[in-house]
Image (cartoon, coloured by chain):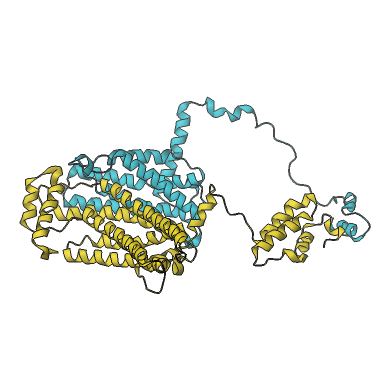
Chain colours: A cyan, B yellow
Amino acid sequence: MAAAEGSGAGGAAKPLFAGLSDVSISEDIPVEGEITVPVGSCSPDEDYSTLDEPVRDTIMRDLKAVGKKFVHVMYPKKSSALLRDWDLWGPLVLCVSLALMLQGGSADSKEDGGPQFAEVFVIIWFGAVVITLNSKLLGGTISFFQSLCVLGYCVLPLTVAMLVCRLVLLAGSGTVSFIVRLIVVMAMFAWSTLASTAFLADSQPPNRKALVIYPIFLFYFVISWMILTFTAQ
Amino acid sequence: MAASDQLRFHEFDEAADLLAATPDATTTSVSERQSHVALDVGSSYDENEEGDESDKTELLSGQKQPPSFWTFEYYQAFFDVDTYQVLDRIKGSLLPLPGKNFVRHYLRNNPDLYGPFWICTTLVFTLAISGNLSNFLEKHGNTSFRYSPQFHKVTIAGVAIYCYAGLVPLALWGYLQWRKGVCLNVASYTLLETVCVYGYSLSVYIPASVLWLIPVSWLQWLLIATAMTLSGSVLVLTFWPLIRLDSRAATLAVLTIVLALHALLAVGCKLYFFQKPVYAVPLHSAYTKAPGGAQLLTASHPRLNSSMTTPLRF
């Protein structure tokens, strides 16, 4: 084919590409691939098949996806499942449960107490949005909702810490319980930060990684502080 | 310039050679000439190739439209910093040297919004947390004290710091712009550079607010004096070259107001978030007399009284 092209361009009077009509494919080169369009599997019923399934199947499928992501957070390996199929159900459930557990706290006067439901909710969602914007502005390649998904799911260890703290506070609220709570919250804070860093750090430009990780550290630090200072009524 | 056979469609590599051969399309440092040339080269080509070649010429000459205000890329220009640059700028604001103007030496026409925003956020939470901790440390010996997280302090700290770091640079920039019109010797930085300087100058208060937890009175005032000196000198050293050729009264007025606002922020934060350390009996009796929410209010009065009668306690 190249030879035919060369001979076609060599003759100065002939227009270009005139030699292409002379080109023929030799029989030695096998033609690969299919040219038949598979018809059988593209029936219109398959596209809408999830509409006919029982509701239980739909809910279980979503719950399983959320559960799988929880497992990914608790054992953070570099898998891309969290990033690829993002969803915001998990973060919503975690945020609402954390805010419900943190609500009110002890209060001598109404304004002197712990964070209210709305304050926790706003801090978590607004904080996650600001961190995502920050990482995108610094040149990160991760998409907006993927980042929100990761940051939301990595609140799971801190929610577990909140549960543990409430149980410990039921037992008593002296120095020993404070030390136990401190250790648990610090461990879960480190777990959250490391988990989210493991998922998010790869998508950042290499000389700005610290600039992206610091806000994530601050975010989980503030949530840990809110959990640690929770005192029951 | 272009022979007739050069206008015909060639293969891709030949077209690139053609562009390289055309003398006017080489990159030079004069931008006006390039944009003018881009139009020239583009108009001499066929209709089909014009879109293609003028784009290539534009790219080769380095000309680009600045991104519009409504696009994401416009704001990415404010975050064009690396880790070492941010750390460098923070170091420069912690240790101001008389020869190094912060804007000229550290910013170098690349102001960023990352530093000011996250320094202010960190300062807000540091103030709230340290204030809560110092409140706890001061009062935990008292039997009637019940610990409370005092979350409303975060909101108050946030409003105070963000208003200071946003509105004061705006006011100063506006004043300098006006003054530039009145008196020709006055120059001005861009708004972003002013916001950047103010943001980075607040960074010295972060370690200061953590160290204020130490309940030694003279150490706290020493810390506040040191912090105010350092961050105030960053501001003065930055703005002095702009206004020193102005009339004496105006120069003095501007510097006084800048420093006074800075001092107001520091002292206000100190007095609101951090209680004075526990002295002796008079404070305790005030607590036990007034339980509940009035604790904070009555606590301030004996302090003021004691400060007026025994100034040596400072």
**Numbered marks: total:** 0
Q: Is residue A193 left or right of residue B54?
A: left
Q: Let me know if residue B177 appears in the view.
A: yes
Q: Residue at x 53, y 26 (%)?
A: A51
Looking at the picture, tell me which residue is in the foreground, A6 or B142: B142
| Residue at 73% from the left image edge and 41% from the top image edge | A34
Q: Residue at x 23, y 57 (%)?
A: B270
What x and y, as percent, mark residue B249?
Answer: 34, 65
Q: Residue furthest bottom?
A: B99
B271 sits to left or right of B44: left
- In this rendering, the answer to whether B195 lies above or below A127 is below
Where is residue A13 shown, x and y percent of the image?
94, 57
Q: Nearer the viewer, residue B132 or A52?
A: B132
Q: Is residue B238 visible?
A: no
Q: Is residue A175 left or right of residue A201?
A: left
Q: Residue at x 17, y 52 (%)?
A: A175
In this picture, residue A174 sits left or right of residue A70:
left
Which quadrant: the C terminus of chain A? top left
Image coordinates for residue B245, horizontal then vertical, percent: 41, 69
Q: Quadrant of residue B274?
A: bottom left
Question: Is residue B236 positioned above or below B273 on the image?
Answer: below
Which quarter of the picture shows residue A8? bottom right
Q: Nearer the viewer, residue B138 or B166?
A: B166
Task: Point out residue B195 in the picture as x, y percentages from the top left corner.
Answer: 41, 57
Which sits in the foreground, B210 or B157?
B157
Residue lying furthest right: A13
Which quadrant of the rendered structure holds the N terminus of chain A? bottom right
